[in-house]
Amino acid sequence: MYDHKFSEVNCRVRWSWRMKSRGNEILRDAIELLRSQGATDIRHRVGGKHIKLTASYRGLLIVTTVPGTPSDWRAGRNTMACLKRQLRTADNDNSSPN
């Protein structure tokens, strides 16, 4: 006989595992982007539902959060867009004459 409750629990466990895996992929992509742009002192700290990612880029501190378990398909895109925006701002701040 088919057990509906077992099936639902099984699906939730698989979904949770996939989401955690996706969070790690987003973190890995973010670190790869920072390294490719020349950021140094890249660190991450896990706490609660998010991972805090910090790096030094051209003398400025870059800080962003990465979801530990992304809630939707845009989580990776949002994290990368925020990170790219911070890198672009740091480039503009360093290139402007004082």
Image (cartoon, rainbow, N blue to C red):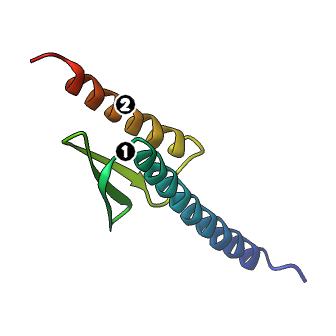
Residue kind at label 1, given as amino acid type? Gly
The residue that mark 2 highlights is 85
Residue 89 sits in quarter:
top left
* Residue placed most toward the observer, 40 or 43: 40
Q: Quadrant of the N terminus?
A: bottom right
Comes first in the chain, label 2 or label 1: 1
* Residue placed most toward the observer, 76 or 3: 76
Is residue 70 something that shows in the picture?
Answer: no
Location of residue 74 with respect to 13 vertically, above or below: above
The residue that mark 1 highlights is 38
Location of residue 4 with respect to 20 vertically, above or below: below
Residue kind at label 2, given as amino acid type? Arg
What residue is at 64 percent from the left and 69 percent from the top?
A: 12
Q: Is residue 93 left or right of residue 4?
A: left
* Residue placed most toward the observer, 80 or 38: 38
Is residue 93 something that shows in the picture?
Answer: yes
